[in-house]
Amino acid sequence: MTAQITVGGPELTQERRLVTEIPGPRSREILERKASAVARSVGHTLPIIADAAGGGTLVDVDGNSFIDLGSGIAVTSVGNSNPRVVNAVREQLDRFTHTAFTVVPYESYIAVAEKLNEITPGDFTKRTALFNSGSEAVENAVKVARRATGRQAIVAFEHSFHGRTNLAMALTAKSAPYKQGFGPFA
Ligand SMILES: Cc1ncc(COP(=O)(O)O)c(C=O)c1O
């Protein structure tokens, strides 16, 4: 059975509803294309293909509805397609998609920096730089710390995960599966 899903957002019925086996026929078809087209190193946890998501619910291409405990690894914590997020993104896209802040700056970057400076711990003067991913932020934090202190050593905790780029991976304690076969490390 195939459900007609045309819209995401929080108006999706917030329910778990299975209407096919998992994965359903349409998901299986697309996953076969994934196996042919996407590098094998890019795995997935749940063998379904997402079609829409809203609030805490995710709907696949076969019309199955799931409670989205994965939350994009805890990054849709205000709900998938939260209207305030969607409207802010839409408004920005209508204005411009990209200038590269280091070429031509824009106010929203500065407003985010001001907000982060305000809500993060510490009553000292703070400044913020934004990066594209956690790994990039970790790598840049190491660069900033080294340049500021003139020292080299970095402390990382046991059981830590810091990312998949080369230095973030070196700092990551969990060897399997993140570091296996990728050495030598910094
Ligand atoms: C604690 C921590 N550091 C770094 C990262 C790496 O972030 P990204 O996957 O955005 O590069 C993650 C992401 O899972 C993380 O949980």
Image (tube, rainbow, N blue to C red):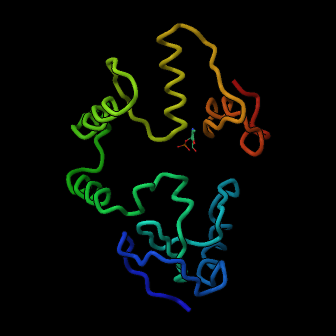
Residue in view at x 37 percent, y 69 percent: 10
The quadrant where ligand 1 appears is top right
Pick the residue in front: 91 or 22. 22
Q: Is residue 76 left or right of residue 146?
A: left
Q: Is residue 28 above or below residue 44?
A: below
> In what quadrant of the picture does the C terminus appear?
top right
- Tell me where residue 185 sits by quadrant: top right
Q: Is residue 3 left or right of residue 37?
A: left
- Tell me where residue 132 sits by quadrant: top left
Q: As drawn, which residue projects farthest toward the bottom?
A: 1
Q: Is residue 102 above or below residue 27?
A: above
Pick the residue in front: 116 or 6. 116
Pick the residue in front: 90 or 114. 114
Q: Is residue 92 above or below residue 130?
A: below
Counting from the top left corner in percent of width and height, residue 58 is at 50, 71
Q: As drawn, which residue projects farthest toward the top?
A: 150
Residue in view at x 42 percent, y 62 percent: 80
Counting from the top left corner in percent of width and height, residue 59 is at 50, 75
Pick the residue in front: 82 or 135. 82
Counting from the top left corner in percent of width and height, residue 40 is at 70, 58
Q: Is residue 146 above or below residue 5?
A: above
Residue in view at x 71 percent, y 42 percent: 178
The tally of labels here is 0
Residue in view at x 41 percent, y 66 percent: 55
> In what quadrant of the picture does the N terminus appear?
bottom right
